[in-house]
Amino acid sequence: MSKQRKPRGVSASPEGIRRLNQAKATETDDEGQSLTFDRLAERAENISDRTVKRFFSGKPVDRGYAIAIIEALGLKPEDVLSPEELFVSESIEQIQAKDTGDSERAGELIKGLETALSEFKKSEEASLQAMEWLKANRKALSQEAAEAALRKHYDQNPNNVDTDYSEDIEVFSQEIRKYLQLIYYCLELGSWELMDRAIQESKIPVNRDLQLYVDALDFIKNQKVSLSFDPEEAKEITLYLDEIINIIPRRL
């Protein structure tokens, strides 16, 4: 007979951490002073301030403690925990309520849910890293990609030897920047919807040879993304780049 499983911990989402800190910054204690972690711990059913700090740092804590901290700040669980986190924790509670915790089947179900959530969190973290990277480097990436694509184009055209295309690089880089901005918002929402809408409504530039856009984005994918992230971390941003690269010749 297996041992009783410990209650599963839950952690705040990145947006949830921001809301926790925002709520804490606007709250005061009974004496009108800024709310400290110690005071918040007392307000949240006298749990330890260490647990409060752990939750604020994005680390998992007991679900009951997490809910107590959230409600002590006047927030709701859905404000702080991701929908996936809520679904998994509630599902596990339901499984445990129907079982003593000794069942091998119940253990397998819980393990499957926890594994799925772990994979989701890895994907979410990779998306956040990619977003930050794009935001910090979008201008430089666009400039380098535009230059590489135009150089390739002119090198392949013997009639354009020694052509000065420096001004064209600047204009083209601004166009590529719009593609990267679209990918940024797709990563932020975790959805293809914006990309589909941008294509359908012709909101991304297609003012020149389509192969130039393909070459520029392919340069970013193979020369920049692959060198900045390991394959697992690059998965999300690579998916969006591949999607645009594949649909440009077909749909734009």
Image (tube, rainbow, N blue to C red):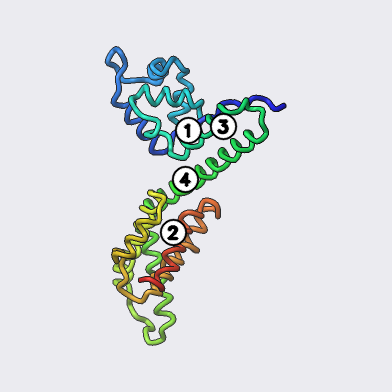
**Separation (CA) of disc 2 from disc 1:** 28 Å
**Separation (CA) of disc 4 from disc 1:** 13 Å
**Separation (CA) of disc 2 from disc 4:** 14 Å
Q: Earlier in the sequence, mark 3 or mark 2?
A: 3
Task: Give the camera-side residue of 94 and 27.
Answer: 94
Asked if disc 3 and disc 2 are in contact, CB closer than 8 Å, the reply is no
Q: Using the image, tell me which numbered label, if any, was put on residue 95.
A: 3
Local secondary structure at mark 2: helix
Q: Earlier in the sequence, mark 4 or mark 1?
A: 1
Q: Earlier in the sequence, mark 2 or mark 4?
A: 4
From the image, state whether disc 3 or disc 1 is nearer to you: 3
Query: Toward which corner of the image does residue 110 lie, by quadrant?
Result: top right
Q: Using the image, tell me which numbered label, if any, was put on residue 124.
A: 4
Identify residue type, mark 2: Tyr
Identify residue type, mark 3: Ile
Residue at figure coordinates x 51%, y 58% from the top left: 226
**One can see residue 148 in this view:** no
Q: Earlier in the sequence, mark 3 or mark 4?
A: 3
> Which residue is the site of mark 1?
11
> Which residue is the site of mark 2?
240
**Separation (CA) of disc 3 from disc 2:** 37 Å
- Disc 1 residue crowd, few under 14, some 14–19, many 20+, Cα 10 Å: many
Which quadrant of the rendered structure holds the C terminus? bottom left
